[in-house]
Image (cartoon, helix red, strand yellow):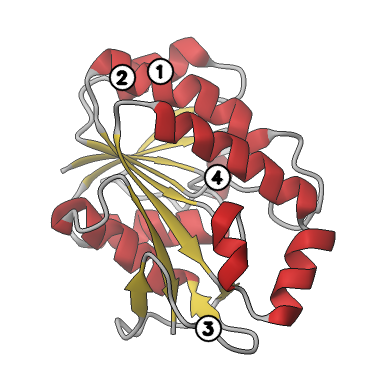
Amino acid sequence: MKLLVFGATGSSGRQLVQQALKQGHEVTAFARNPDAISADERLRIVVGDTTRDAEQIAAVVRGQDAVVSALGRRNTFRSDNLIARSMHSIVPEMEQAGVRRLVLMSAFGVGESCRDAPLIPRIMYRVLLRDIFADKKSAEDDIRRSSLDWTIVYPVLLTDGPPTGNYRVGERLELHGMPKISRADVAHFMLSELKNRAFVRKVAVISY
């Protein structure tokens, strides 16, 4: 599969790239800083900014089979509207190019998923992550209005643990305490969903 990865330089994005290459996908990584990506002769790297380079996005989207996104703001509570501004460019360019499949990593606690959060995480989402989650919600609204075959993935608290393949996924999950999931397992699910298509035009909460 020809696969385009946005957010490839982050911790989750690197997992997506590594696992996709291992699975034999033809991977293109779109990134502002190509030096942050481990060199691999099988990997095509395109330099660009998802919030500014619409023409570059249009060019790189053409010919892809699917797009996966792990875009995020990393260690900050300020969104700068990164995800919403990026999706304003990515979604219409995918529609224009006829590339329908999009798997987006968002976060558990965004939108209606907050209702299922245990007490302590729910407080954190509403106080510390208010701006970050508002940005993600705005981006998701754009995606939901599109004609794309989207899947929005809601991981709980992310860790750098190893892949286990032993996790729970559902549109809603019963959760307690401070639920966690490794970035490696989130990447595993996102790539498997490209083939399985069990959550097309649905959200997928993922946790141990």
Task: Tell which residue pokes out farthest to the right in this image.
Answer: 127
Q: Which residue in the structure is indicated by mark 1?
A: 92
Which residue sits at x=78%, y=60%?
A: 126
In primary-sequence order, the first of circles 2 and 4 is: 4
Q: CA distance from mark 3 to mark 2?
A: 36 Å
Q: Which residue in the structure is indicated by mark 2?
A: 95
Q: Amino acid at mark 1?
A: Pro
Q: Decide: marks 2, 1 in contact (CB < 8 A)?
A: yes
Q: CA distance from mark 2 to mark 4?
A: 19 Å
Which residue sits at x=45%, y=25%?
A: 90
Percent of width and height locating residue 81? 70, 34
- Comparing labels 2 and 4, the label whose residue is closer to the camera: 2
- Tell me if mark 2 has few (under 14), some (14-19) or many (20+) residues whose alpha carbon lies within 10 angstroms of its own: some
Report the disc number at residue 175: 3
Report the disc number at residue 44: none
User: From the image, which quarter does the N terminus lie in?
Assistant: top left
